[in-house]
Amino acid sequence: MTFRPCLVVPVYNPGPALGRTLDALLTCGHPLFLHDDGSDEATRLQLEAVAMAHPGLRLSRWPDNRGKGAAVVEAFRRAQAEGFTHALQVDADGQHDAGAIAPFLALGAARPDAVIAGVPVYNGSVPAARKYGRWFTHAWVWLETLSFDIGDSLCGFRLYPLDAMFRVLSRTTLPARMDFDTATIVRLHWEGVPVVNAPVRVIYPEDGVSHFHLLRDNLRLTRMHTRLVLGMLRRLPTLVARRWRGNAPRDHQWTKIQERGTALGLRAAHLVFRLTGARGLRWLTELLAAYFFLTGRSARRASGQYLDRLFAYAGPLADLPTKPGMRARYRHIRTFALSYVDRFLAWMDASDAEVVFPEEQAFQTLVHSGRGTLFLSAHLGNLDMLRGLGAARGISGLNAVIYSEHVIRFQELLSRINPGYSANLIHVAEAGPETALLLEERIARGESLFIVGDRPPASENGRTLAIPFLGREAPFPIGPLFLAHLLQCPVYLFFCVKDGPRYRIHMEPFADRVDLPRKGREAALRTWLERYAQAVETRCRETPFQWFNFYDFWGEASSLPPLPPTATPPPDPRP
C-alpha cells in the first residue's frame, strides 16, 4: 500500500497557542493542511500571514463555524484530492507534542492499513476532571466495540488512512463537532480497520483556550453513545464472530505482532489493585484471560501448535498426561496472564509468593564477586521475579537486556508506579557487536546481564540458525551467544518457574566463557545453540504451560520433517 502522509489541523480561535503549534509543525517539514473553521478576525489574519510566509502551506476557510469534525473532514477531502494517502490530525491548541509526529508516521509507514491512535501521556497540567472523566467514554467504547482495542477514543492526535475514512463517510454521516473523534474511530473499528495505539505526550497550556461546553457537549456525547450502542447491537453477530476468529498476524516474526491489551486496561488493573488488593486483581485477570482466550485466535493456534508438538515429542508428561485440547490451551493462556499478576505484585511489594532459590548462595557470591556475569534465559516462567526479589533484598546491578522494538506496555506502567522497575532495563535493537560495546561497561563494573535467547532477532537482517527443538527445527538467534563470546564473561542458564503456590529459581553453569573461533565459527555456534535449546526443552517438559511464545515459533521450518527424539544432549563445546 502506498504511503504519502500529510498533517491536518482544524483551527477555531485556539488563542496564543496557535503560533507555537504552527512553528512546531512547520519545522517538521511535512505537507500541512489548515482549515479555519470560522475563526475571529485576529486568528484569520494570523493564519493568512503564516500562509504567505510558507507558500507550501495549504489554507482554507469557512466564514462560519461548522464544528471540528466538519473541518477535519474538509481538510481530508483536500488532502486526498492532492494525492495524499494518510493524514495525521493535530489539534491547534498546543496540547499535543510535535515530537510524536515522526514516530507516528513511522508506524503508519509500517502499518498503512491501520489507524495510528494517540494514547495521552499526561503531565501535571491536566485537570483531574478531564483525566478521570475520560473513563466514562472509554467504558462506552469498550462496549460499543466489544473490545479493548482502542486505547483512547478522545485523543485528537491520530493518523488516518484516507481510503478507509472515505469508505466510512460513504456509508454514514459522522458527527461534526466534539463527538467526531470518538464516533470516527468506533466506526472505523466496526469496518475492520486495525487500531495501533501509540503514546503521545499531552499538556494543557496555561494560555490554552477550551471550546468544550459542559452541558451542550455532554448531551452530544450522550446522544452519540446511544446511537453507537444501537449500532453495536445491529452488528452484534458480526462483531462477536470477528472477536472469535481474531485477527491473526500474517507475519511469523514476533516483533510484527501487536501486543494485545492497552495502556488504559493496565491502568484499570492498577486501579482494581488499589481498591480491592491482590485478590480482586487476580479475579479481574481470570476474566481477562477468558476474554483473550475467546478472542485471540492467533494465540490459541500458537499455543496448540506448541503443546501438540511437545506432547507428540515428549509426552505423556506429568503435567500434560493426555493429548492437549482446548482446555490445555486455555490453561496455557491463563498461566501467562496470572504470571503478569505475580510480576506486578512483586514490584508493588505486595507479593505473598514464596520463592525457593537453592542456588541463591552461589548467586549472591557471583553478584558480589566483582566479576560480570551473563545470565541466559528464555520466555519461560517469570524471569522478572528475580529482579523484583533483588530489588526487595537490596541487590543492585541486575540488568535486563530487552528489545526496544517490542517494549511492552506493562513495563511502561510499572515504570510509572515504581520507578525502580526501569532502573536496570537496557533497551537494545540487536544482540551483536554494537550491543557488546554498550554492555561491556556493565560487565567491567562487575554487574550482571540477563538476556533471553529463544526468539528470532527484532531486526530483519538478524541471523538465526535452524536448531532442533521439540522434534522440528526452529530458528534460534545467534546474537545472545555471539554477545557472550564478545563479552568473554561467565555464562549461566537461569529460569524462574511457578511450582504450585511458590516460585522456584534454577541456575546452572553454561560456560566459563563462550569461544567462537573464526575457523568453524558456525559449527561452534550451532553446538552452543543446541545445548541452549535442549536446556529450554527440558524446562518445557517439566513445566509445559510456562513457555510463553504465542506466535508461530517454528515458522516456515514447521514444514520440515520431524526429527527423532534425542535422549542425550549434544556434545559440550567446552575444552
Image (cartoon, rainbow, N blue to C red):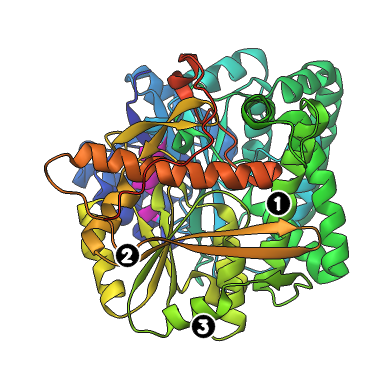
Find disc 3 in the rendering and name its residue.
395
Position of residue 115 in the picture relative to residue 428 (left or right): right
- In this rendering, the answer to whether 549 lies above or below 248 is below
Count of numbered badges drawn on the protein: 3
Quarter of the image for the C terminus: give it.
bottom left
Taking depth in this image into account, of 368 and 336 the one nearest to the observer is 368
* Image location of residue 289, percent across then percent down: 78, 43
* Earlier-in-chain disc, 1 versus 3: 1
**Residue 78 sits inside the magenta stretch:** no
* Earlier-in-chain disc, 2 versus 3: 3
Q: Quadrant of residue 229?
A: top right
C-beta proximity under 8 Å, tags 2 and 3? no
Q: Which residue is at a point 50% across and 81% down the rendered structure image? A: 364
* Image location of residue 488, percent across then percent down: 24, 64
What amino acid type should be assigned to the residue bearing mark 3? Ile
Tell me where the magenta segment starts and ends, as one range: 98-107
Label annotation for residue 512: 2
Identify the main secondary structure in magenta.
helix
Label 3 packing within 10 angstroms: few (<14), some (14-19), many (20+): some
Find disc 1 in the rendering and name its residue.
265
Q: Which secondary structure, mark 2?
A: loop
**Residue 102 sits inside the magenta stretch:** yes
* Earlier-in-chain disc, 2 versus 1: 1
Question: CA separation, marks 2 and 1?
Answer: 44 Å
* Image location of residue 276, percent across then percent down: 88, 67
